[in-house]
Amino acid sequence: MYNFMFHVPTKIYFGKGQISHLEELKESGRSVLLVYGGGSIKRSGIYNTALQILKDVDLQVFELPGVEPNPRIETVRKGVTMCKNEDIDMVLAIGGGSTIDCAKVVAAGAKYDGDPWDLVLDGSLVKDALPIYTVLTLAATGSEMDCFAVISDLTKNEKWGTGSEYMKPTMSVLDPTYTYTVSPKQTAAGTADMMSHTFENYFTKQEGYLQARFCESLLETMIHYGPIALEKPDDYEARANLMWAGSHAINGLVSEGSADAWCVHPMEHELSAFYDITHGQGLAILTPVWMEYVLSEETLPRFKEYGVNVWHLDPNQDAMQIAKQAIEKTREFFFTTMKMPANLRAVGITDDRYFKKMAEKAAAGSKGSYVPLQPADIEEIYRRAL
């Protein structure tokens, strides 16, 4: 286990009715930029509830609606301009990971003199940020409790992740009841996203016994409760466990001290940048293909652990047999149990004309990963996923 710094300053209010704690925003100033996506928070009543709480503590509210599922830099720039022109004190995101990611870069951009795209390309340029508050409505990305954000510039077919300690939220409200109305598609995609975060940290060359066991318990939780949430959208325990598991999959608990660079996420970011597909669906499609591609005698021990400890396969079987069964179990879970698209064609990607360019960019973003992949390797993974 290598040296690390673990710092999660985010105050979490978890459970029913915890949105009342939005009154604490008054501690950060007198004006707030409310960031959200489509109209779902209005239909659900969360919007009106939040506005009333903010009004009761005399906060002036400015709004940035319409954040895209793959948030665009244009929307970020609009929010930054509002913050600077109106001298806004803080940012409140109500929504899922895309909304929170947008709000994070807006908060950082409000304290930066240049173009906020600079901060996407190089997180080290972030030297300060407005206080960030969130109300989570979709369990998936873990952005409510981490330092990361992913922003797209589709005019350049670019989607990049950035991160800074300054972009960790001050406070997040996690009310599982707010995820009851999440669609089956997004429930499945969210489960796949948090599973992928866990896989990225679990499949590592680094020593980290405790972190591996944390990962396995998170994966078991996701595998157990994902289907329940899909079949019973208002099952509180299912939604609660998924929500809390999603936060811990990426807040540093399972990565600090033991993780390599990520690999599947950079590959999927290129899919989203070029084709604007749903992130979790792309991850689910790529993950089993990547697993099969990197399975070897060298990686076999971790795949065997995965099969035995997560899928509870018979440990007395041949190790390679266990590994292959575990990969097949993963594929069945995503595509049969969670009813997700099983290949790239199913999400509208029918040819390989961009694969070479995508692979080159993905390879640059995944240097130092569990199994080093060259552009040709990643291009082949894309083709096998068609």
Image (cartoon, rainbow, N blue to C red):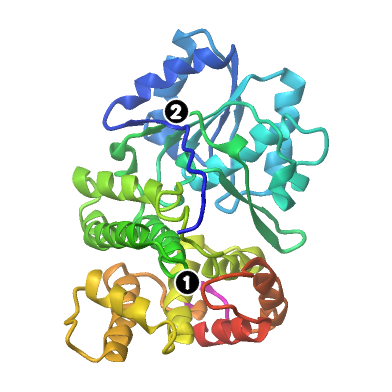
Q: Position of residue 326 (x, y in %)?
A: 29, 80
Residue 321's place in the image compared with 336, above or below, is below
Give me the residue at 30% from left, 39% from top.
Answer: 176
Label 1 environment density (alpha carbons within 10 Å; few <14, some 14–19, many ≥20): some
Q: Place residue 172 in its image quadrant.
A: top left
The part of the chain drawn in magenta is 346-351
Q: Is residue 181 visible?
A: no
Q: How many marks?
A: 2
- Numbered disc 1: secondary structure: loop
Of 309 and 375, the residue lying toward us: 309
The answer to whether residue 339 is left or right of residue 34 is left
Give me the residue at 47% from left, 55% from top.
Answer: 257
Q: Position of residue 69 (x, y in %)?
A: 55, 51
Of 106 and 373, the residue lying toward us: 373
Q: Which mark is residue 47?
A: 2
Of pointers 2 and 1, the one earlier in the residue sequence = 2
For mark 1, what is the residue? 205
Residue 208's place in the image compared with 352, above or below, is above
Residue 191's place in the image compared with 89, above or below, is below
* Distance Cα–Cα, label 2 vs label 1: 45 Å
Label 2 environment density (alpha carbons within 10 Å; few <14, some 14–19, many ≥20): some
Q: Which residue of the protein is positioned furthest toward the right in this rendering?
A: 114
Q: Is residue 196 visible?
A: yes
Give me the residue at 59% from left, 35% from top.
Answer: 65
The quarter in which the N terminus is drawn is bottom left
